[in-house]
């Protein structure tokens, strides 16, 4: 992508309303724009990151056997009256009346609707296990939305729902998502730690939150230092192997880990002082087992092997892709801007032309751009006539993993410069060597 | 994908509420489920088609130089008061009050919001031309939603918005999208014909609709038979070459073409009788040039080369991906079900095991499935224990381009059967030959 043809509106001033670093950096780098309180437009750079995060989530959900659907944003209030949550949910639910005076709402979550889909089609235990997920915009009318996309009102959520014949199989379904989440966050380049959690308004008796460690995190967390080095399951986990799944989950729930809400000081004191890690974290995923809470209320039953009808046992599993964009920045930035992990970077590489308009420099950049693009890299080429200082600052701000810097002085010696955004390391090398090194990935 | 692990809830009965064939087939094949009037869940098979359609649109928008963003679904009423459309829009607009009693709405279209984004960042003609598009769910509260996803209330729309310094450059922007649309629909395997259109509530002085011909179409259309054979622009169109674009647009707007709303009987009579094609069509795209209607009202100006401020000239360009799913079915089906064009088919191929549980047949199918999947094909493998008749009927219903039929009798002769869904042609061939023929694509 040529920067001159792109839409990357960087702000020079740090916006006053932004209280936390991810919000400031997202506004300054032109990733998002606030349209109303807690409601954002995703500008091109932000949208690319969001889509990469979505892609990793989708990939790992599919790997774990979940099947993707897409439920609408607008729901009928009738479904929520069936579950009893319509009156319980409070003012966070955006209630709507349509032209025929029917009560509707903008879905804050989808337990009711997916249970309705399930009961409409599935009749037999033979069609289980089933896990349906979707990635859709939700709305929760927070009193005081803040922290940018970290606590917005309109936000993207991946929510999966599992259906099983009994509690034992539901536990396997829960473990599948638990393991899938470990892989999902690892692939995004962040360390997420599962912690015992309160079940809140979803209900249920087993729940874990996944938190990313970040100094600016919203929650206090207390965990055993071992979590920093536990092995993350590889891509060949067998998601049909209940024992293997349980073993991974046991490993990842063995050492102490709790947010301040669930913290137990006496258990904590039994962890050796040197192993105690008290830090701050950001919740990026939350999984629940809630048994027959919704299937009982909404009459979602299947025939079992015994011929009798059984309410299905359910769980739900959320990840917030839009919140993750901010959370990853909180966990990975420096004073100059964002430092994207490679897997979620909006472009693989920034190419900086230090003298746009100079025929030789332009030609060298074109050559590099074409070669790297043909090698499958997604390159942002700064072909503008801005001064070098501004170009460097912008590339650091938007945080692409690598920068290639091309100017007439280096070219005279047959060399260009490669800079690693994270380490700051720079090396001079020939164009061919740079293309081989980057394009050979 | 193994059918036994998929979620493909086919209906045996033809749903009574479905008035048109695409709606019936989408319900029967388990592509969608109605949640409320005009509001649908997309089940796995339907979602795959929707995503393929989106992918083609995105690809062609990017090729034409448009840049993707994502605006939220919920908008502030204030923006619409600025343009004057808040009161004009009528009951189709879903109006919402949030917990702080602010007037909000579920966006039916985005001219106001995108103009607001533009004016917030762009100051100079040097940043033009600019075309921003997004693919987002919209809501229009139709009095009587019907025809399934063809006229739903919550629907997916790709809407692009162009910004240019003057009318001449805006014309080029319009032509870019015109040409892009020709390519977009061609790639989906349908013939779409551009027709002069009324501008309606969007406003403006130049507009074309793109209609797919289908016997069951909602609109009468009158066009010169030449449209059936006009050359569709290739992938190497230069979208920066205004003359080349204008030539293509002139070719595609030369012969007579109009919907019944815009039909001019005297012009029509000047078309030779043998060249007159009176048919029915379905609108799948609509493009508008509306000049400074919104930029004047909302004060979206840029500095020109003359140093003075000029309101930008705008256009908007819509395609309905969710509507297209239905429209393509209307244009491509037979009495047994859907016939997907390859580019939008949910899977490339259906693999039918005629005797699941038989060790040899299972092994042959596994081998074929693995080989074709490794070759990059997306295969739906019917590994269920249903009877052959039911399996054949389902594969025909869901309309995958090819079917591979594997049974013990054929295998005894070293042969399996390949059926083309569209032509009905069948051939017997060895497993190796089948894999080579299909996987070599």
Image (cartoon, coloured by chain):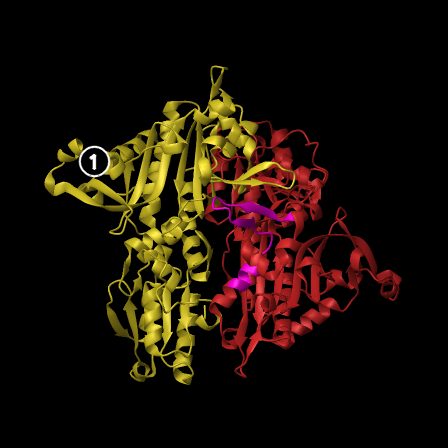
Chain colours: A yellow, B red
Visible residue check, residue B437 = no
Where residue A315 sits in the image (x, y, percent)?
Answer: 41, 31
Part of the protein shown in magenta: B92-116
Nearest the eye: B433 or B150: B150
| Magenta stretch encompasses residue A180 | no
Coordinates of residue B361 in the picture (x, y in percent)? 51, 32
- Up the image or down, A126 lies above or below B226; here it is above
Q: Taking A343 as reference, is A126 above or below it? A: above
Viewed as shown, does residue A12 lie left or right of B137?
left
Q: Is mark 1 on a helix, strand or loop?
A: loop
Q: Along the horizontal axis of the image, is B189 left or right of B262?
A: left
Residue in view at x 64 percent, y 39 percent: B26
When asked about the image quadrant of residue A353, the answer is bottom left
Task: Tell me the chain of label 1.
Answer: A
- The image position of residue A435, as x and y in percent, is 35, 70
* Horizontal arrangement in the rendering, residue B11 relative to residue B376 (left or right): right
In this view of the protein, can residue B200 be seen by the observer?
yes
Outermost front residue? B101
Residue that numbered label 1 is attached to: A256
Q: Residue A400 falls in which quadrant of the image?
A: bottom left
Badge 1, how many Cα within 10 Å: few under 14, some, many 20+? many
In this rendering, would A394 be left or right of B394?
left
Residue at the far left in the pictured view: A273
């Amino acid at each position: 992508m040529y920067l001159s043809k792109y839409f990357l509106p960087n702000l020079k001033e740090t916006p006053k309303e932004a209280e936390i670093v991810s919000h400031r950096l997202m506004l300054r780098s032109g990733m998002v724009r606030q349209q109303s309180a807690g409601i954002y437009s995703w500008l091109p750079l932000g949208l690319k990151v969001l889509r990469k995060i979505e892609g990793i989530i989708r990939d790992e959900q599919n790997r774990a056997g979940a099947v993707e659907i897409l439920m609408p944003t607008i729901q009928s209030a009738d479904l929520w009256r069936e579950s009893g949550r319509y009156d319980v949910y409070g003012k966070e639910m955006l209630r709507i009346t349509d032209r025929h005076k029917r009560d509707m709402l903008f879905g804050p979550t989808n337990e009711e609707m997916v249970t309705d889909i399930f009961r409409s089609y599935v009749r037999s235990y033979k069609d289980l296990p089933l896990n349906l997920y979707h990635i859709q915009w939700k709305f929760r009318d927070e009193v005081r939305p803040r922290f940018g996309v970290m606590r917005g009102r309109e936000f993207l959520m991946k929510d999966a729902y599992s259906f099983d014949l009994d509690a034992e199989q539901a536990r396997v379904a829960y473990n599948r998502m638990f393991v899938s989440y470990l892989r999902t966050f690892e692939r995004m380049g962040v360390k997420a730690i599962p912690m015992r959690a309160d079940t809140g308004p979803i209900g249920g008796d087993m729940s874990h939150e996944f938190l990313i460690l970040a100094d600016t995190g919203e929650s206090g967390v207390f965990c055993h230092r071992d979590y920093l080095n536990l092995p993350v399951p590889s891509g060949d986990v067998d998601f049909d192997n209940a024992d293997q799944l349980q073993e991974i989950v046991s490993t990842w729930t063995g050492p102490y880990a709790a947010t301040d809400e669930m913290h137990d000081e006496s258990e904590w004191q039994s962890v050796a002082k040197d192993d105690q890690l008290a830090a701050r974290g950001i919740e990026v995923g939350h999984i629940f087992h809630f048994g027959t809470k919704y299937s009982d209320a909404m009459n979602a039953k299947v025939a079992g092997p015994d011929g009798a009808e059984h309410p299905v046992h359910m769980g739900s599993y959320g990840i917030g892709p839009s919140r993750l964009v901010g959370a990853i920045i909180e966990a990975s930035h420096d004073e100059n801007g964002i430092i994207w992990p490679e897997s979620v970077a909006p472009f693989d590489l920034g190419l900086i032309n230090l003298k746009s308009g100079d025929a030789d420099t332009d030609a060298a950049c074109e050559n590099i751009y074409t070669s790297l693009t043909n090698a499958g890299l997604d390159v942002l080429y700064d072909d503008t006539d801005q001064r070098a200082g501004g170009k460097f600052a912008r590339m650091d701000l938007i945080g692409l993993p690598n920068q290639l810097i091309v100017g007439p002085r280096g070219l005279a010696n047959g060399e260009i410069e490669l800079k690693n955004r994270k380490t700051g390391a720079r090396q001079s090398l020939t164009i061919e060597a740079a293309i081989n090194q980057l394009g050979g990935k």
